[in-house]
Image (cartoon, rainbow, N blue to C red):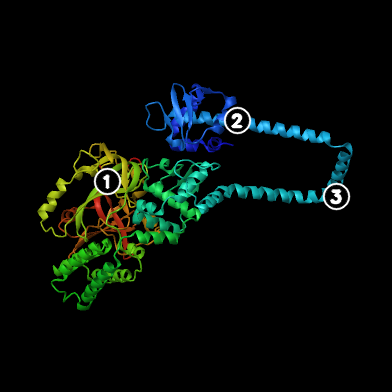
Amino acid sequence: MGEWESVFREIDDDYLVGISNKGIVKRAYKDMETTLCKLLDQDQNEILEEAASGFLQGFSMEEGITVKVGEETVHIRMPLGESTCSCPSRSICRHVILGILTVQKMSAVIDQEASVQGNAEETVEKETVKKETTEKEIIEKETTEEETERENDQKTAKQEPAAKGAVIDEKQTVTGEEKKETAKEVFKEGNAVDGNFPKSGNTMTNNVLQQIASYPLEKLCKSLGARRLQNLIDSTRAGKRPQIDYASVVTVQPLAQAMTVKLLYPLEYSTCTCHKKEFCVHKAEAVLWCKLESGQLNIDDLEQDQSRDMDYDMEQIQDAVSQMRNCLEELLDTGLARTPQDAIDHMERLATICHNAKLPNFENEWRRLQDSYNKYLKRVASLRIQLLMRQLTTFYGQVERLGQARNALEVSKLAGAFRAEYTMALDLDLLGIAMEHFVSKSGYEGETVYFLEKNTGKWYTYTQARPVFYDNNTANRAGSFYRSETPWGLSVPLRELAFWQIHLEQAKCDSRGRLSASKETRGELIRDRRVDKNMLTTDILGQWYYQDFAQLFEEQFQRKENVSEEGISQDSDSEMRTKLVFLIPASCEKAVFLETEQKLCMNLYDEAGKAVVVEVVYSKDEAEGIRYLERITNENLPCFFGKVYLRGGRIRMYPVAVFNKKELNETEL
């Protein structure tokens, strides 16, 4: 069998869809019935089917095959994704696919004819042998066979059922594991394809597996980035792996954001549901998963390669640890009453040191600690001394663990990342719910807009934050809110974005549902909630809408792991995914403002008498909201939207917004 026959025997529809798309392949199959296709030689003369066998076997892979498809001329090359057509299309068109199908069909006919001819020759040879055999030999042979059959009849009858069962089991096992074992053998050999043409005898599956095996690990790690690579390592150690199907196209699913990747030969023609033409992070992740499953790469090797790629100066890290440890020990030794006046400046200097050492988590902790000490020195009543001391001791433990880190990998697990890595989330239909203004303890101020995805019911957020470490001018901060640019090319101010339903194309988000303001994302305004009163309904809010607080506890806390007793962090850079819910209470108690703790408390009750406590700590930004909550009674009880958390054995809520009956339509319950 020639090289071209070997290639065309392995091509299937999945491969053709990979180098083009489903629509083009369907159109090519449809056109086969009406379009005249001719196989041409180098002189552009038609080659008939009876002469095609010699033509395919004698034609080299470098020269390619020419096919006349209707009025167009198709030149088929290897890899097939580099085939060309005389039509204006710049990519793989229906003429190329039709040309490939024509040659494949002709190749199948040739194989069938060769098989028939081979069987005929074998039959003639057997008849000749029989004629040359003497009658005596035939009689002796038949007698011997009859005696042998009689002696083994009983044994065969007894063993037959078990033997059949064994054969069936063996066949099933081979069928289920055959492709994986083939993949492992290819990976063990580690033979790289030369990049131009497959070697004779190689199947399409082997070609793509060889390219996967030879793909540089360094490039894969660089494409994924530290955070995504760490997530992959954690998933592997937890036993979570994607499903991988081996055929002419290696399919890996699901990956991050439920992406599906199809790897084919050559890898440059691989496809992903994020629709990026280049070698995206999902394709890199798919190749890495294939290496891990085949045994070519183990998790320990991957961690070592990851640690080598991380750019940490271990001497600088240890110096930062020493300075942080000394400062925290001094603060704990002197106590709060004797806190030196320069302690705040010292914390700021240490935050800068952590920033330069690429330790963003520790930088944020210093700024949070700085905020807490500022409140203590200013005698802010809302500051709780117990929480401040716990903050100090917890931070000291983190510094000690950083000091014990032996390599860059262990440092990275504690250091965190300055920026989130965004991945494609495809198209989103988002319902604007509310906007929250925040001032974080880590020194950032900004706005967060909360969106509910209409089709999946998932939460997404968009945040605009700005550092305010050194900005003490509150007038400038207020003005920047109104000057904030609205993302995704939308023609409404940012402060009105929460009132709209929008459609995003090519949206990007991180693992926590935080949306990117990428210029590649395009937005479209659909409808305004202030005009369309039926935009928010209890049916759309679905699983996030609660009237039964016992159900709230069961679904949001009892079924979740790692329930926090420390309360919700209102920082924009919080690592935990916030629990956002809508509450419809049956009744409430009048809000009470606690002067000693400088916070408002308000009990909400469902029909069974189960309670949720609304808590808002006083600040200038919260003053107006506190005054509104104090005026709420059973007669004007609204729907509460906010963040729920556990503390002291009770469900508590920080309200982000409230909705009256006109804004929330309950007709679709």
Spatial separation of the CA atoms under disc 1 and disc 2: 65 Å
Q: Amino acid at mark 2?
A: Ile
Spatial separation of the CA atoms under disc 2 and disc 3: 47 Å
Spatial separation of the CA atoms under disc 3 and disc 1: 86 Å
Q: Of discs 3 and 1, which sits in the foreground?
A: 3
**How far across and down, in percent of the image, does residue 668 sit?**
35, 40
Q: Which residue is mark 3?
A: 151
- Residue 320 appears left or right of 15: left
Q: Return the disc, 1 or 2, that comes first in the chain's sequence.
A: 2
- Residue 138 appears left or right of 223: right
Mark seen at residue 110: 2
Q: Return the disc, 2 or 3, that comes first in the chain's sequence.
A: 2
Whether 80 is drawn above or below 382: the answer is: above
Q: Secondary structure at mark 3?
A: helix
- Residue 496 appears left or right of 647: left
Structural crowding at the residue carrying mark 1, measured as other residues with C-alpha within 10 Å and reported as few (<14), some (14–19) or many (≥20): many
Q: Amino acid at mark 3?
A: Glu
Task: Quadrant for the N terminus, please.
Answer: top right
Label 3–label 1 contact, CB within 8 A: no
Q: Which residue is mark 1?
A: 433
Structural crowding at the residue carrying mark 2, measured as other residues with C-alpha within 10 Å and reported as few (<14), some (14–19) or many (≥20): many
Q: Secondary structure at mark 2?
A: helix
Can residue 532 be seen in the rendering of this structure?
no
Q: Return the disc, 3 or 1, that comes first in the chain's sequence.
A: 3
Residue 500 occupies quadrant:
top left
**How far across and down, in percent of the image, does residue 613 sit?**
28, 59
Q: Of discs 2 and 3, which sits in the foreground?
A: 2
User: Closer to the camera, 7 or 397?
Assistant: 7
User: Closer to the camera, 270 or 137?
Assistant: 137
Q: Secondary structure at mark 1?
A: strand
Can residue 155 be seen in the rendering of this structure?
yes
